[in-house]
Amino acid sequence: MTKTVETQQRLDRIETKIDKLAEAIISLARAEEKLVQLENDKKFLMEQMIKFEDRLLRVERNNSETAASLSFISKFFWIGMSAIGAAIIGMWFSNSSN
């Protein structure tokens, strides 16, 4: 009978250890699933960052082109204003000398 009790206790300890191992394996599987999900999220975020970087570069390029056009228009406007001002002053001086 003592041998049976010892055997039962030993089997109980083995069963407890097996249960703990099963729990550990389940925990590892869950951790692996979380790592896979994190990796997928990281890939998605990197793709989004690349898209936003490309978009930002396009906006910067467009901004540079717009700034160059605006600079030309501004210079042309001031040349025109100077010519008009010179014409008005010229007409004023020509009328006052008569």
Image (spheres, rainbow, N blue to C red):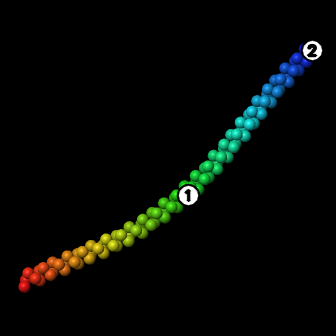
**Position of 72 relative to 15 (above/below):** below
The spot of residue 79 in percent (x, y) is 27, 75
Instruction: Look at the image and tell me in which quarter the N terminus lies.
Output: top right
Residue beneath the point at 72% across and 38% down: 28
Which mark identifies residue 50? 1
Q: Amino acid at mark 1?
A: Ile
Q: Amino acid at mark 2?
A: Met
Numbered marks: total: 2
Helix, strand or loop under label 1: helix
- Which comes sooner in the sequence, label 1 or label 2? 2
The spot of residue 45 in percent (x, y) is 58, 52
Q: Which sits in the foreground, 31 or 95?
A: 95
What is the quadrant of residue 75 in the picture? bottom left
**Position of 60 relative to 94 (above/below):** above
Residue beneath the point at 42% across and 66% down: 64
**Position of 11 relative to 71 (above/below):** above
Q: Is residue 70 left or right of residue 40?
A: left
Residue beneath the point at 7% across and 85% down: 98
- The residues tagged by marks 1 and 2 sit, at their Cα atoms, a distance apart of 73 Å
Q: Is residue 59 left or right of residue 23?
A: left
Quick one: which residue is furthest to the right in this view? Answer: 1
The crowd level at tag 2 (other Cα within 10 Å; few <14, some 14-19, many 20+) is few
Q: Is residue 18 left or right of residue 84?
A: right
The crowd level at tag 1 (other Cα within 10 Å; few <14, some 14-19, many 20+) is few
Q: Which residue is disc 2 drawn over? A: 1
Residue beneath the point at 52% across and 58% down: 52
Helix, strand or loop under label 2: loop
Pointers 1 and 2 in contact (CB under 8 A)? no
The spot of residue 66 in percent (x, y) is 40, 68
What is the quadrant of residue 74 in the picture? bottom left
